[in-house]
Amino acid sequence: MYKPNKVITLGQFIIERQTDFPYAKGELSRLLRDIGIAAKIVNREVNKAGLVDILGEAGTDNVQGESQKKLDVYANEQFIAALSSGGETCAVASEENEEMINIESAVSKNAKYVVAIDPLDGSSNIDVNVSVGTIFSIYRRTTLTGKSDLSDFMQKGTDQIAAGYVIYGSSTMLVYTTGKGVNGFTLDPSIGEFCLSHPDMTIPKTGNIYSINEGNYLHFPDGVKKYMKYCQEEDAATKRPYASRYVGSLVADFHRNMLKGGIYIYPTTTKSPKGKLRLMYECNPLAMIIEQAGGKASDGFNRILDIQPTTLHQRTPLFIGSSDMVNKAEEMMTRYSQVSV
Ligand code: P6P
């Protein structure tokens, strides 16, 4: 007898998991739905970027002083609009905006959540058709009433309510966690829905892929140099040498390593003495996801999720992926690059 595969859409899944939050009245579910809607809109533009005048420079710079691509400005606008109209978010902190954005309409609705987001990470790859991504982090506001303020965002990664990413690649996927495991949804363009395709995602305890920009080798800490040499040594028992895979798009490297096992490292360099990646909307959300998937995320010495933020756009070194591989890299950092206190 024909048994149709049961398709579970993101919306259905969120509602079914509502019971994970007995005290929630659906606000988080609606917030996740809003993010899914914006991701579908951004996906539509990413997929036709080569056909319309949406490629290239926007002629503006973001807070990091990086030239903004038209598509990352567009993506930023779409996610902020979706979160604003959804009414569940009282403030947004975006890589593309220097200051946090208060959503007045939501404040009047007593919205519970704030969202930190990198609307289109890896956007320099758009023009060459390499996968890009969105990364988001959701916190419960700590201020009690009225306008949100910076203190709502100055929460450790361990306080995140939910975190996720969207990868706009050979297929478009939304992967998220609310602290009860990690689930992946693939966009089915024929029905315009994200459908559950990767339930209960876990990262292999070890792997044989390392992702790092080897071009910065001379500027890396000695511990990173030693770990890279370790990855390159011949040793059949540990399946070395590992494969070097670096897309130059964090979400693409992270997602591949999640599925196959591996480690991604963006350490300090002379050009980025605090690391390049941002804590609030790149490292913390991916660290929550990787830990929920059984992996590990540190700055080379300390757990990412334990870092106390002090500014919205602060950077941190990032070692993230299979736990055995991160442990080995940390061992090298401790042995060869321990910062003398
Ligand atoms: P580099 C993209 O700008 C990004 O933030 C990540 O997506 C990517 O992994 C990294 O920077 C690439 O940086 O210095 O190696 O080009």
Image (cartoon, rainbow, N blue to C red):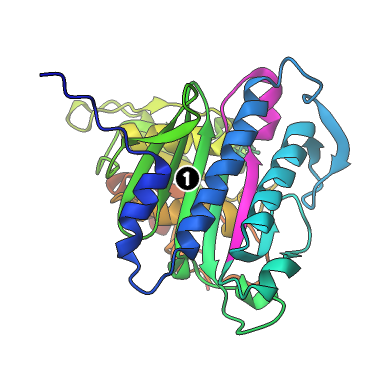
What percent of the width, then of the height, locates residue 270? Answer: 67, 48
Query: Where is mark 1, residue-wise?
Result: 224
Residue furthest left as drawn: 1
- Quarter of image, ligand 1: top right
Residue displayed at 79% across by 58% down: 98
Residue at left offset 33%, top offset 29%: 233
Residue 138 position, x and y percent, is: 53, 61
Q: Is residue 59 left or right of residue 211?
A: right
Q: Residues within 10 Å of mark 1 (few under 14, many from 20)?
A: many
Residue lying at the far front of the rendered structure:
1
Taking depth in this image into account, of 312 and 214 the one nearest to the observer is: 312
Residue 285: x percent and y percent? 49, 54
- In the rendered structure, which amino acid carries the disc numbered 1? Val
- Callout 1: SS: helix
Q: Residue 298, can we see it?
A: no
Chain part drawn in magenta: 114-132
Q: How many marks?
A: 1
Q: Nearer the viewer, residue 22 or 212?
A: 22
Identify which residue is drawn at 43% across, 69% down: 25
Check the picture and name the quadrant holding the N terminus.
Answer: top left
Residue 119 within the magenta-colored segment of the rendering: yes
Give the quarter of the image for residue 152: bottom right
Reply above or below: 163 against 247.
Answer: below
Residue drawn at 66 percent across, 47 percent down:
79
Left or right: residue 216 versus residue 26 is right
Quick check: 45 left or right of 203?
Answer: right
Residue 121 in the image: above or below residue 20: above
Q: Quadrant of residue 205?
A: top left
User: Is 135 located above or below residue 257 in the figure?
Assistant: below
Residue 78 percent across, percent down from the top left: 70, 44
Q: Is residue 294 visible?
A: yes
Based on the picture, tell me whether residue 292 belongs to the magenta stretch: no
